Image (cartoon, helix red, strand yellow):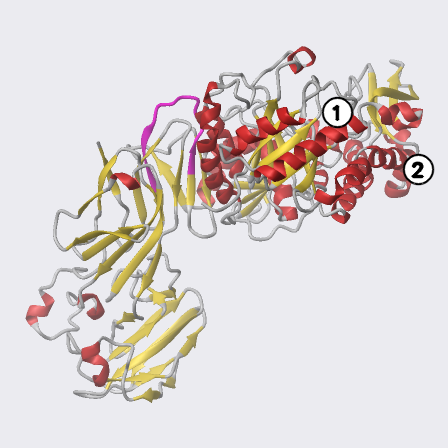
Amino acid sequence: MSRECPLIPMGAITGRPTREQLGRRLAQFRELGITQFLIYPRSGCELEYMSDEWLDTCEWLIEEAETLGFTSLWLYDEFNWPSGQCGGRIQAASPDFALQTLEISSDGDGGRSFSIGRYERFPNLLNPEAMELFLSLTHEKYAARLGRFFGRLIKGIFTDEPAPGYADDYGDGDGGGVLKLAYYPELEEDYRKKFGRPLRSDVGTPGFFERYHLLIGERFRRVFFDRIREWCTRHDLLLTGHLMGEDSVGGSHRFSGQPLLAISGFSLPGLDEICTRTTIDTAEWLTLGTARFGVEARGNGGLAELFALGPGDLPLAKQRQMISLASLFGINHYVLAVSQLDSRGNIGKPGWYNPYSPDQPWFVSLGQLGEDAKIAADLAERKAAPEIAVRYPNGEKEICDLLRALVRAQRPWRLAAWEEEVSGAIEVIRPEPGGYRLERSGRSAGTPAGMVALLDELLPRRAVVENPDGSLAGDLMLKLYADGSAVVLDLTDAPTGRRLCFRCGGRSVDFMLPGRGRVIFERWRVERDRPNLLRPEWRDGVWEFTVESPVTVIPALRTYGSAAGLRLDGRPVETVASRAEMLPEGFRELYAAGAPVALAAGEHRLELISPVPDYAYLPPVWLTGDFGFSLPDRLAPDRLDGCGLDEYTGTLTQTGMLDVPPDAAGFDLECDELATSVSFDGEALGQRLWPPFFWSVPERFRGRRVLCRIVRHTSVGPAFGDLSGGGRISEAWARGFEPGRFRLRHPVVEPRFRLF
């Protein structure tokens, strides 16, 4: 796979490293195929942050990385976190640059008092002057020293958990105690201008927090994200990183005001999932969905900071599982937190330790994780099939249980903003105080389980994963893509695999889902070597049919043994060639080709102008073209997925990526007894003309992802349709044919691997 390895070690620069130490660590990563690195100043670093000595160290590291062939380096905009303070210098520069709160106390008798509080531990990200100072002390200093690498080797700057909502004891306004609201000096005037009412008297009224969070969210986006992203854009950099508290609606509003507005303020949006929660009950579905909203808003991909909380014995299988889960939400960059130069930071940060360094005996295997992460990153960049949209609540109603229920029910979803015009979604769920409402059907349900039941009633699944007994499989996530592919990700904490069945359209695939594993069902591309042929089912010289989507057909009219005349939708069909080149060779001179006809979606009517014999193997008319038809009276454009080719005559070539199990001895194909040949990565594995339709797997292909090509040659029989019924054919022996004898039972074939 040619793409860059998407793993990004989060390189904590500890102690006072020499250039040789930095080069040695980079070389250890480079030997494993790692080409990206994030320079991370945190506890354990003994260099003064943003001093010349710190910048010297960064410059050494970048020069060594360039020599070693690294392709993407990332800067971090803070010492430890949260971002925006330059190691505490911002809030130390002015009292107004420290985080401010409007503090509201109740006297118990309905009265309130208001005061302004300051918290010097955090910066005020709502103060434009404070953020200008932040840019000058961090970004501008990096630009002055390292600007020659910007947009070339240095790809972006990472901002970590910025938020205006870090004040202690942030309440919900429901009684005694102190309510602390993120504040800036113009807040009350801005509130009055935007909503036409005074903020202080509005506190506690219905809808107050929705109004307040909207105002804070807009200010946060404008003062922090837009300002820094614009700076990054001018310097050919991406602004990346993640928010704070995205795992709940209440937390997101507290820390970001409007979380979807904030996340789309990044140019490379991200998420923080350092706990590695990978089961349906524990996964941070709202965090994942929020990041995906930003990814789709920006179109540059996404980034995830992963694994920092460990523990230090986190299995590689679970790390792969977490990377895979992030990829299903559009994340294609995976930050490995934390890669310390040494362990002295464990004094300042004693609560967790999960090093991405040679201290891990499995460090030598990191390259293999990187190769698998490339597959995950490719999945992240695929366009999703239409999904259920869930509106992000404007108030405090939580939706995590709903998102969890949709995953459990194998109902793919995405988040939508509260007032967003939603297009391309199957349905839109709007959370309401008493439950949830489907916007298009108008139906409502009071609980997540009720909403799932309502969806089951109204919306048939396009795909499903079942247990061997036919019941819905649990503990997994199903993701469908616009190109027809699909992914099933195991969401258990057990390494034990299980037998399941994937059903989608006409496909039915029995498969083994490994514990914590991922199975990709690639879209098979099925191509024809000639136009499809359809023989009309005449009833008194008339055939009525339906076109599902616009399609173009070319009629072929018999000219030999009683010539056929034809009307289509009341208009005579004119012939434009005396020879129908699109037919099999032995029929071309016996038919004339009509002009191409574009058929709109809807009902159509074909009529024979005068009665002519309908010979079993020389019909009066064929329709030809790039269409499919699973029912003889319903046409649709050929989607190159095998659908609608049940009666195709010719050669079918089926191609797609195939994951070959490491212990695969060979595979069987249900190829309808057609002459079939198979190749892997262009290497022929042989042709089979009769059972057993079994192919051995050469050892060199085991455990690999290969391009599989399956070529099948049909008989000429399907061109003549079903000769068994309706009294259409006069020959008695023709009526004796079995119904559907010529039809393909498997327009798409699925290799069934036999394991050693």
Q: Can residue 160 be seen in this snapshot?
A: no
**Residue 456 appears in which quarter of the rendering?**
top left
First in sequence: mark 1 vs mark 2: 1
Residue 312 image offset from top left, x and y in percent: 53, 16
Q: Residue at x 71, y 31 (%)?
A: 58
Residue 496 relative to residue 483: left or right: left
Of the 4 image quadrants, the one containing the N terminus is: top left
In contact (CB < 8 Å): disc 1 and disc 2: no
For the residues labelled 1 and 2, the Cα–Cα distance comes to 34 Å
Q: Nearer the viewer, residue 286 or 151?
A: 151
Provide the residue span drawn in magenta: 488-502
* Tag 2 secondary structure: helix
Residue reaching furthest to the front: 20
Whether residue 137 is in magenta: the answer is no
Residue 202 image offset from top left, x and y in percent: 86, 31
The residue type indicated by label 1 comes to Phe
Instruction: Return the mark for residue 79.
Output: 1
Q: Which residue is mark 2?
A: 189
Q: How many marks?
A: 2
Whether residue 495 is in magenta: the answer is yes
Q: Residue at x 35, y 23 (%)?
A: 496
Residue 153 vertical position relative to residue 108 in the rendered view, above or below: below
